[in-house]
Image: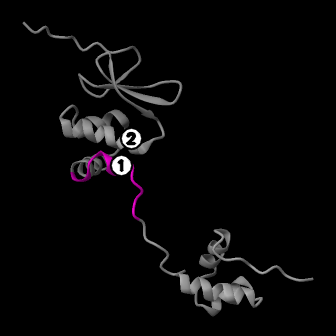
Amino acid sequence: MPQAMLPIFPYGVTHINSILAFQKNESGQVVYFNGTMPLFTHDEKDRGAFKMITAQFCVSGTAKQVEIARAFGVKTISVKRAVKLYREEGPRSFFTPQNRRGAAILTVEVLKQAQALLNENFTPAEAAKHLSIKPNTFSKAIKAGKLQVAKKKI
């Protein structure tokens, strides 16, 4: 005959629900527990692992989305988005780089034209005005190393 196991948790945990808890330890790790058994560990700054494991708890029925939101002090919509991502793309999706838009203004051709102007001793402000680009965008490209300013000769 199966024996019921009481939900006994280690000292100092924060309960998510009656069967699930977590603890942040002094080394910066978050450990999730089912009773005394640790389920998963991740660094407290690892947002991808946090979203993945909490979404997995919700999808598997171990925790409700509202319980995750209350226990960790996050917005319910962010938990819902993580659960949706987990269901549609799986755990791997939390660790792949996001697709971001490329440079819309400073295309390869515009960068070539800008560098040619800078090589002809235009100041960055003059080159930006000549190409109808905001000076701030131009200075960001210089700081990022996409453009090199010609050094002034004394």
- Please give left or right for residue 150 compared with residue 58 in the image: right
The N terminus appears in which quarter of the rendering?
top left
The answer to whether any part of residue 92 appears in the image is yes
In this rendering, the answer to whether 151 lies above or below 61 is: below
- Please give left or right for residue 144 compared with residue 29 in the image: right
User: First in sequence: mark 1 or mark 2?
Assistant: 2
Label 1's element? Answer: helix
Among the 4 quarters of the image, the one containing residue 8: top left
Residue at position x 69%, y 89% in the image: 117
* Residue extent of the magenta highlight: 88-99
Among the 4 quarters of the image, the one containing residue 16: top left
Residue at position x 21%, y 49% in the image: 87
Dot 1, crowdedness within 10 Å: few (<14), some or many (≥20)?
Answer: some
Percent x, y of residue 37: 31, 18
Dot 2, crowdedness within 10 Å: few (<14), some or many (≥20)?
Answer: some
Residue 91 counted in the magenta span: yes
Residue extending farthest right: 154
Which residue, given by chain and number where applicable, does mark 1 sit on? 94
In this rendering, the answer to whether 5 lies above or below 113 is: above
Residue 21 counted in the magenta span: no
Residue at position x 74%, y 85% in the image: 123
Percent x, y of residue 120: 75, 91
In this rendering, the answer to whether 9 lies above or below 119 is: above
Image marks 1 and 2: residues in contact by CB distance under 8 Å: yes
Among the 4 quarters of the image, the one containing residue 38: top left
Which amino acid, by three-letter code, is at mark 2? Answer: Ala
Q: Which mark is residue 84?
A: none
- Please give left or right for residue 99 compared with residue 140 in the image: left
Residue at position x 48%, y 24% in the image: 25
Q: Which mark is residue 49?
A: 2
- Please give left or right for residue 106 compared with residue 22 in the image: right
Q: Nearer the viewer, residue 110 or 129?
A: 110
